[in-house]
Amino acid sequence: MMSGAGDGRYDTRWVGRMPLARRLLRFIMFRPFIVFAAYFVLVSMLAVVPDPRTTARLSLVAAPWVFTFMLLLHMPVIGAAFRGFRLLPDVRVNHALEHGTIFFLSRRCGKRFKIGGKAESDGFRLNGMPSIDLIAPAFEDLRSALARGETRPVISRHCGSMIVTAQALSAILLTAAAVAFLVFDYRQRTRVVLLGLVLLVYVALRHGLGLLLQRRWFLSLDFTHAELRSIKQVKPRGFLERQPVYFVRTVVQ
């Protein structure tokens, strides 16, 4: 019988650990607020400079460096947005199945395991689990939930689309603020107020907007039947996957 969430029999050492450099990169990439904070500090420098002529000189000197820095910070947004909003229907369906399977896997494994996944046209990849035997029961849990009309398990706050949305929102808001500070001769108090509004809008919208776009563009429940065809262990791909990695092949109608 499958064990429930938080079962102490699962040994976290069984899941392969990443090198420190990869873990640090993952930590930054999966926390878009860090990117927002870095950009916010740069734009704040424009808001607190009292002399417009000083601001202009500062912007001329700093612009190339700021542009390069922000391009590096938002590279995940550029690539993911280009791919994400052009997902094929089969990939969007498997993306929903991947989310739902991870939801029920997390219930069985507890929060000690950082389970990740990636959808493809004929199935999805899973990584960072303690046992392959947990996948099929979790998938069946998902099928039962969908049969009851429960769609909450397929919506994930940990999806890459949430990161893309949050970083895109920060880039738009803070770039608009920076341009406004350079073009218009606002008083310093007005600049600080506008910067505060940018912070409030970002905090208020980043999760809700991300979930909305995830439902609309990245997922699909447009199917009547889904089942597992096979599960096999595969080699890790890229620098985000933790060993072991499994490919779950699906049949969707």
Image: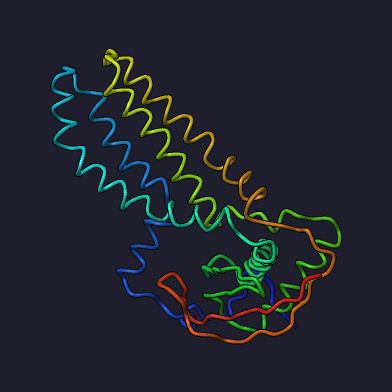
Q: How many marks?
A: 0
- Residue drawn 13% across and 36% down? 61
Near-viewer residue (229 or 122): 122
Relative placement, left or right, of 170 versus 158 is left
Residue 14 lies, with reference to residue 214, above or below; the image says below
Name the quadrant of the N terminus: bottom right
Q: Is residue 130 left or right of residue 92?
A: left
Question: Could one spot residue 107 in this view of the protein?
Answer: no
Residue 237 seen in the figure = yes
Q: Residue 181: horizontal and vertical position, in percent?
A: 29, 23
Q: Which residue occupies 65% across, 65% down?
A: 91
- Which x, y percent locates residue 185? 27, 14
User: Could you tell me residue 191's position as x and y percent?
Assistant: 32, 19
Give the side of residue 47 with respect to residue 216, left or right. left
Q: Compare residues 121 and 188 and report the one nearer the observer.
A: 121
Residue 235 rendering spot, x and y as whole percentages: 49, 84
